[in-house]
């Protein structure tokens, strides 16, 4: 009965005011970051990735959003369970505010936390005609090149009004529910989409860490990790997204 | 960057865009719809926004004037996309979106299907793009496809090449007999018609060339037509001719069951009983030794003479276990009675004179034949596939033949008069078995195929040959010579053959592969021909040792080779060479001597192929060299006097000949512009070609022995271009040539023969669905022949072959078909009779009942009563014209009942 009333309310409302119902603007989405480690095992040999490592490694992140603001952070319980905490970018936290054109990212480099504040990444998206379903939403495909050379395939839905997405991916006319970096063998795909109201106070920038600039951060990563890992360039992008 | 450039170029010139988005049906203002602008050139996203609660949107941030794609989307509405020119100020646009829910109900999407496409080497026609009448069989569809021709007898050719096989869904169906399949399958069941060159199964699996291709058609059926039954019953009769046939087919997914029965004396439903080459095992090295027969009739009605045909057959095939196992089998029986009456004229051009032979032959043949075959296929695992086939055929052929001929010299005096009566009875049996194993390996591109086949054939026969022959030696003594004989012959031969073919292919890099081939062929033929002279009392018989023989012919062949395959982007290259070693061993038990011959053969080949990116174009250039071995008959030093005026003498010293072939093929099928270009050019040079040294004695008898000539060249070409002249009118032009130069020896003089023809063609096809279909072919040709032993032999002539086929659809469910062919042949010095023919057939169909399933047919065949079959052959220095009596004008009334039930509601 409640639904009937709700339906009547919306139906009559639209008739009276001559408007269509609004689309959702807030909610939370769980993304799975999936890495094909079999590919790296083959490329680097097992010594670097561990013999027992599974062929695919997954990490889970939650994106909470209201209108033009979002925060993207790891789902802690899952990290502890899988012991995947050591992966690069495993505890990235990204706060995005489209309206004020700022992002605040928290990055972990060998246990030291850094805070970066920068404008929203201006990604040039090329639209394609392709569509596919992700988590029950029809998504449209767009391609782009980021960080000068990394090819990105993204799927967004215009069913959700917020123009946001996982990590620092944004700038498409709707919510990005899937991202793949085919040559890096990594992808982020929405597993569950929850469009209930979100406590706006929980969406706030991270505060922990040393404040730094983009160029300063890049130097820090290269100087601290470079001597330890000859394959750093293969996953450096994870710190730069 | 785009934005900064724009702002530099014209700071004052800023474009903005605003408007409302509404629902087309209800008029609701739509909120939260995405309105986006993308670059029209590269679809880069430039700007986007969402409509507000009033369906209003506005974008005015630094837009550069120019062309954009504007796209408006909202879930559950159809996307709105438009190319929009934004001018340098405020642009207004109001957009209404169409709800998807309404779209499905209101709009039936009517698309024009892509009629022709080229898929690798396969030319593909979408059947629905061509219109045929209700209940039409697939041969009516073929008539409408560009490049296809269906002749009066139902024979199909594509771009001038005869179609040898028709497959149904890629599988054998009634031995792939083109005429039978095209009359069985309904046009409305066909999804696609695919034309390609069928290789042996082994060559197709390994992706290699084997030089053994047959023009084939595959009919891809529509999924929804594979569940149900269909068939037809036809009865027709008239003053002298009748035909009746029935067909029933039940298809259920992969299971197909069909039966047919035909009885007719009009030649309709003729089924080719010719033994089809088996294209399973590659048989890379095959040595065919035909069994010694007393009757040269092939056991087939080829449109000549008067046939009576009774035939029936059944076919079943099925797949199960997730298509991992398949079984198939069929049985066919036939009885064919054929009476023929043929008159012939042959001019023999000799160094010193010309002889003219006038002949007449009347014969009556009866053939009884049964054929059975079965096959089983199993996929043992995802890498291994096994195929087995067995077949058996039993035949009985009897013939009565009356031959009369007169040979006259240039003065017109007869030098040889012959009349011969023969009566033969032959029985044949054959068994065949085949096993193929195809194996792939874990590494992509690595494969092995192994084929083993065996055959056992027997032929037993006997015949009476009574010859009255009187000759005059006008040059020397001018006395008459009596050459009468009365002979009785018995023949018994048996043959077994085993072939083994192994091919292993492996990749050597990402783009190239090597294949290793090995083939073995073993053959044994035991042949016995005993000729008895019958004494004048008709009872006593004595063996004629000249014309009797008894021998065993063994052949052992081994062949091995290596081939290189290269594929990169659109290019494909194959090159390789095989070497073959063959030995022949002939033991003559009648005269106790042994002949041994060993041959080395070389088989180099190279092929370069290009396939266009979008599948509309293909081009290939190839060279093939091969050693041709002489046949047993050519080597055979045994005499045969079945035809006393043409006696063959074998040549045990005959060497192999070598053939070089260069071929160029280019196809361009532009399906959007409906233009097709087809160019096919070939050049063949044979050195040491098998030819004959003829010795014609003063009484006109020819004895010929096989020899190696110096060379033969054959130069052929065909170019066809078809294009749309108007919306429904297609026109085609073609040009072809066929030039041959060969040699023989006539009475010790070397003779070089040049003959050939040039053909031009013009083709029109007009198709107005449900109104009219017309095709017109006009083919003038020029034929020439010259012989170096006798210049000015005067055998050049023009020919014009014109065919018109039309179907006119009338109201009241009736239609008129007419086909008219006009064949004009220029008279020559030798052939002065009028051989022009106008063949005109007309028939009217009236569809009865609501379902149009019953068709009443009134037909008049050969309305002008002119039918005759005239052939002119030019063979070395002999020019012959043969005329056959054929079925002339007749009228028939017929009824056809088509029935079908495709049970689509009961989908699994």
Image (cartoon, coloured by chain):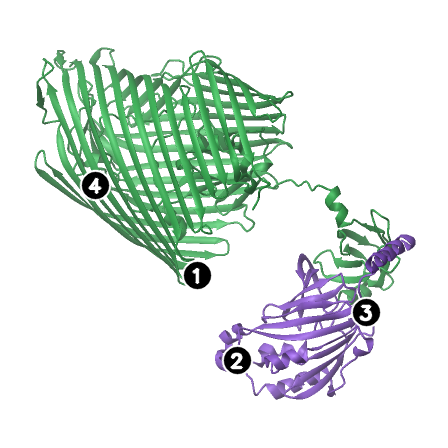
Chain colours: A purple, B green
In the rendered image, is residue B880 in sight?
Answer: yes
Position in image of residue B536 (x %, y %): 10, 13
For the residue labelled by badge 3, is the local secondary structure a helix, a strand or a loop? Answer: loop
Residue B651 shown left or right of residue B712 in the figure? left
Residue B409 shown left or right of residue B682 in the figure? left
Q: Is the Cβ of the residue at disc 4 closer than 8 Å to that at disc 2?
A: no
Q: Residue at x 60, y 78 (%)?
A: A235
From mark 2 to mark 1, how far is it between C-alphas? 28 Å
Q: Which chain letter goes with mark 2?
A: A
Q: Which residue is mark 4?
A: B655
From mark 1 to mark 4, how far is it between C-alphas? 44 Å
Q: Which residue is mark 3?
A: A67
Foreground label between 2 and 1:
2
Q: Which residue is mark 1?
A: B444
For the residue labelled by badge 2, is the local secondary structure a helix, a strand or a loop? Answer: helix
Q: Are marks 2 and 1 on the same chain?
A: no
From mark 1 to mark 3, how far is it between C-alphas? 51 Å
């Amino acid at each position: 009965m409640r639904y009937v009333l709700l339906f009547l309310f919306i139906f009559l409302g639209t008739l009276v005011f001559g408007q269509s119902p609004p689309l959702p603007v807030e909610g939370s989405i769980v993304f799975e970051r999936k890495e094909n480690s079999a590919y790296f095992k083959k490329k680097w040999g097992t010594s670097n990735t561990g013999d027992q490592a599974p062929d695919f490694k997954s990490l889970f992140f939650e994106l909470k959003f209201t209108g033009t603001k979002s925060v993207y952070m790891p789902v802690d319980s899952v990290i502890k369970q899988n012991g995947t905490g050591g992966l690069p970018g495993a505890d990235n936290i990204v706060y995005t505010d489209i309206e004020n054109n700022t992002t605040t990212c928290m990055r972990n480099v060998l246990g030291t936390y850094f805070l970066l504040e920068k404008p929203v990444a201006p990604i040039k998206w090329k639209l394609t005609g392709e569509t596919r379903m992700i988590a029950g939403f029809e998504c449209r495909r767009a391609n782009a090149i980021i960080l000068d050379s990394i090819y990105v395939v993204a799927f967004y839905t215009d069913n959700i009004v917020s123009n946001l997405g996982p990590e620092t991916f944004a700038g498409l006319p709707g919510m990005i529910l899937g991202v793949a970096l085919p040559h890096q063998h990594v992808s982020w795909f929405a597993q569950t989409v929850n469009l209930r109201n979100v406590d706006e106070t929980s969406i706030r920038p991270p505060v922990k860490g040393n404040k730094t600039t983009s160029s300063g951060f890049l130097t820090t990563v290269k100087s601290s990790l470079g001597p330890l890992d000859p394959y750093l360039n293969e996953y450096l992008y994870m710190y730069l997204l | 960057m785009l934005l900064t450039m724009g702002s530099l170029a014209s700071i004052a010139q800023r474009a903005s865009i605003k408007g409302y988005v509404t629902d087309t049906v209800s008029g609701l203002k739509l909120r939260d719809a995405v309105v986006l602008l993308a670059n029209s050139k590269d679809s880069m996203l430039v700007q986007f926004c969402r409509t507000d609660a009033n369906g209003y949107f506005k974008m005015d941030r630094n837009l550069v004037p120019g062309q954009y794609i504007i796209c408006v989307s909202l879930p559950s509405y159809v996307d709105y996309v438009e190319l929009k020119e934004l001018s340098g100020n405020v642009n207004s646009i109001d957009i209404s979106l169409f709800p998807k829910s309404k779209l499905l109900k209101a709009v039936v999407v009517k698309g024009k299907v892509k009629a022709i496409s080229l898929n690798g080497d396969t030319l593909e026609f979408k059947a629905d793009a061509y219109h045929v009448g209700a209940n039409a069989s697939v041969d009516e569809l073929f008539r409408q496809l560009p490049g296809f021709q269906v002749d009066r007898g139902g024979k199909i050719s594509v771009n001038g090449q005869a179609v040898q096989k028709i497959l149904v869904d890629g599988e054998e169906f009634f031995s792939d007999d083109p005429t039978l399949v095209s009359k069985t399958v309904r046009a409305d069941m066909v999804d696609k018609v695919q034309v390609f060159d069928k290789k042996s199964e082994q060559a197709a699996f390994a992706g290699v060339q084997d030089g053994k291709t047959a023009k084939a058609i595959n009919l891809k059926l529509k999924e929804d037509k594979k569940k149900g039954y269909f068939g037809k019953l036809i009865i027709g009769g008239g003053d002298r001719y009748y035909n009746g046939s029935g067909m029933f087919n039940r298809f259920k997914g992969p299971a197909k069951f069909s039966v047919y029965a035909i009885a007719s004396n009009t030649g309709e439903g003729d089924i080719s009983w010719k033994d089809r080459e088996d294209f399973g095992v590659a048989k890379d090295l095959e040595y065919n030794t035909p069994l010694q027969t007393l009757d040269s009739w092939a056991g087939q009605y080829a449109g000549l003479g008067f046939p009576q045909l009774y035939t029936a057959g059944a076919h079943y095939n099925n797949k199960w276990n997730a298509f991992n196992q398949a079984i198939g089998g069929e049985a066919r029986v036939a009885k064919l009675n054929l009476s023929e009456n043929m008159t012939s004229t042959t001019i023999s051009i000799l160094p010193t004179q010309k002889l003219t032979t006038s002949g007449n032959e009347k014969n009556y043949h009866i053939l009884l034949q049964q054929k059975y075959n079965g096959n089983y296929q199993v996929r043992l695992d995802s890498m291994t596939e096994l195929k087995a086939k067995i077949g058996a055929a039993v035949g009985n052929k009897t013939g009565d033949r009356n031959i009369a001929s007169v040979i006259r010299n240039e003065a017109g005096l007869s030098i040889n008069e012959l009349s011969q009566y023969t009566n033969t009875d032959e029985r044949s049996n054959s068994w065949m078995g085949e096993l193929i194993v195809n194996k792939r390996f874990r590494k992509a591109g690595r494969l092995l195929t192994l084929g083993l086949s065996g055959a056992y054939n027997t032929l037993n026969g006997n015949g009476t040959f009574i010859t009255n022959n009187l000759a005059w030696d006008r040059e020397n003594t001018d006395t008459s010579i009596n050459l009468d004989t009365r002979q009785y012959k018995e023949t018994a031969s048996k043959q077994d053959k085993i072939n083994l073919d192994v091919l292993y292919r492996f990749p050597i890099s990402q783009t190239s592969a090597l294949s290793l081939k090995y083939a073995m062929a073993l053959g044994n033929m035991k042949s016995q021909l005993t000729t008895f002279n019958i004494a004048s009392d008709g009872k006593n018989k004595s063996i004629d040792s000249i014309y009797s023989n008894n021998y065993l012919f063994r052949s052992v062949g081994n062949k091995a080779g290596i081939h290189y395959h290269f594929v990169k982007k659109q290019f494909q290259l194959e090159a390789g060479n095989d070497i073959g070693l063959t030995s022949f061993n002939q033991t003559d038990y009648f005269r106790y001597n042994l002949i041994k011959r060993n041959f080395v053969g070389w088989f180099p080949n190279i092929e370069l192929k290009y396939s266009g990116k979008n599948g509309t174009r293909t081009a290939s250039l190839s060279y093939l060299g091969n050693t041709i071995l002489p046949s047993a008959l050519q080597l055979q030093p045994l005499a045969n006097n079945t035809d006393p005026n043409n006696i063959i003498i074998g040549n045990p010293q005959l060497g192999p000949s070598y053939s070089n072939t260069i071929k160029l093929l280019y196809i361009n099928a532009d399906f959007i512009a409906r233009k097709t270009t087809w160019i096919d050019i070939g050049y063949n040079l044979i050195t040491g070609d098998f030819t004959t040294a003829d010795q014609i004695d003063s009484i006109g008898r020819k004895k010929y022995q096989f020899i190696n000539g110096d060379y033969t060249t054959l130069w052929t070409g065909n170019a066809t271009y078809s294009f749309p002249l108007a919306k429904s009118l297609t026109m085609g032009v073609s040009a072809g040539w066929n030039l041959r130069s060969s040699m023989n020896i006539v009475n010790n003089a070397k003779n070089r023969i040049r003959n050939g023809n040039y053909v031009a063609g013009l083709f029109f096809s007009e198709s107005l669905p449900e109104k009219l279909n017309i095709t017109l072919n006009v083919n003038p040709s020029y034929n020439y022949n010259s012989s170096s032993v006798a210049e000015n032999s005067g055998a050049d002539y023009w020919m014009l072959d014109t065919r018109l086929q039309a179907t006119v659809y009338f109201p009241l469910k009736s239609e008129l078909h007419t086909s008219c062919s006009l064949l004009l042949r220029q008279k020559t010095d030798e052939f002065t009779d009028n051989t022009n023919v106008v063949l005109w057939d007309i028939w009217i169909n009236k569809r009865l009942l609501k379902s149009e399933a019953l068709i009443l047919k009134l037909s008049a065949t050969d309305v002008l009563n002119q039918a005759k079959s005239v052939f002119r052959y030019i063979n070395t220095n002999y020019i012959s014209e043969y005329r056959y009596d054929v079925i002339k004008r007749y009228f028939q009334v017929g009824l056809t009942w088509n029935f079908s039930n495709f049970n689509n509601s009961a989908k699994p």
